[in-house]
Amino acid sequence: METNPQNATRPPRKRTTNRVNPFMSTVWIAILIATLFTAWTPNSFFTNNLRDQLRTLLTPQVAAPSSPLTPQPQIRIGIVAGHMGNDSGATCYDDNGDVTVTEAEVNLSIATLVQRSLTERGYQVDLLNEFDTRLNGYRAAALVSIHNDSCEYINDEATGFKVAASLETRDVNRAQRLTACLTDRYQNMTGLFFHANSITADMTQYHAFSEIDPNTITAIIETGFLYLDQNILTKQTDVVAEGVTQGILCFLNNESVMPNDIISPTILP
C-alpha cells in the first residue's frame, strides 16, 4: 500500500482537554438551582434579588459569637442589728456600776457575722439599723431582726432564746417556716432553750413588720438573755451567729423541719 509522504512527516496532533474550573462549576450550579427555585417559588418568599441571594449563598458565613450566660440575680436578705443607730438597748453593769456590755453591741457583733457568713455563700445581705430608712417598703426573700433580752437577773429560768413572726403577714405558712427554721437550727447549734411561752407583743408587733414590703417574710429573734447567757453571747458569738445563719439557710433552701418545731407561741402582754 502506497504511503503519502506528507502524512508520514506530519507530527501527530495533540488532543485538547477542556478543563473545568471547580469554582465556576459551583457558581453555575448555584445559578441553576436558584433559577429553578425562583421559578417554582412564590415571589413573596424572596426579599432580595437573585444576585443578592447568590452572593449570600456563595459567601462563607461567620457564626455569630454566642452571648455569655446571664448571671443569676443574688437573693437579697436583710439583717437588722437591733437598736443600732438608735439607742444602746439593755445595758449590763458590773458590781462597781461600770458598763460591761450593751445589747446594741452584742446585736451588732452577731449581725455582722451573719452578714459575712451569708455573703460568703453568695447572697446579697443588707445590714440595717433599727430604724433604717431602707426598711420602708424593703423587699427581700427574708428579713431577720436580731435582739437580746434583759441584763438583769429575773430567775433561774431566764435563759434561752425567742423567735416570733408578724401576726399580719400575708403568707402565714412561709412565716411559720422561717420561725420554725430559726428555732430548730439555732437550738441545735447553741443548745439554748426555746422560750415559746415568753414571747411578748413587742416581738409580734415589732415596728419593722409594718414598714417593710408585705411580701417580705420576716422574723425577730432574741438570741439570749444578757444575764445568764452572756458568756455564750459574748465569747462564742460565732456559734450564736452560725445558728441564725443556718436558720435563714433552712428557710431559703426549703429544708426539712420537724413538725414539732412549728410552734404557736403564747404571747405575753
Image (cartoon, rainbow, N blue to C red):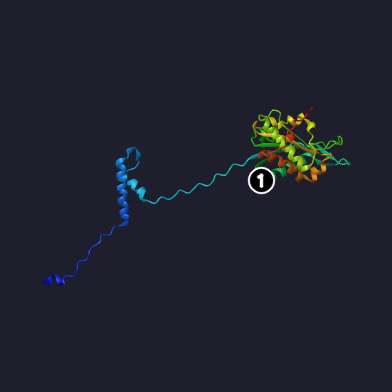
Q: Position of residue 160 (x, y in %)?
A: 80, 38
Where residue 120 appears, as percent x and y from the top left, is 67, 47
Question: Around disc 1, counting alpha carbons within 10 Å, would you say few (fewer than 14), some (14 to 19), or many (20 or more)?
Answer: few
- Is 133 located above or below residue 113 in the figure? above
23 relative position to 73: left or right? left
**Residue 156 relative to residue 115: left or right:** right
- In this view, which residue lies farthest toward the right? 95
Front one among 61 and 101: 61
Tell me what residue is drawn at x 31 percent, y 42 percent.
Answer: 38
Q: Position of residue 93 (x, y in %)?
A: 85, 40
Residue 6 occupies which quadrant of the picture? bottom left
As drawn, 11 above or below 187? below
Q: Locate residue 134: give its quadrant.
A: top right
Q: Can residue 21 be seen from the camera position used here?
A: yes
Q: Position of residue 252 (x, y in %)?
A: 66, 39
Q: Secondary structure at mark 1?
A: loop
Q: Is residue 130 visible?
A: no
- Horizontally, is 46 left or right of 16 in the view? right
* Residue situated in front as seen by the camera: 71 or 10: 10
Question: Residue 210 lies in what quarter of the image?
Answer: top right
Looking at the figure, which quarter contains the C terminus?
top right
The answer to whether residue 3 is left or right of residue 197 is left
Q: Indicate whether 264 appears above or below 52.
A: above
Quarter of the image with the N terminus is bottom left
Give the labeled residue for mark 1: 121
Q: Nearer the viewer, residue 257 or 202?
A: 257
Residue depicted at 29% across the width and 48% down the height:
32
Amino acid on which the number 1 mark rests in the picture = Arg
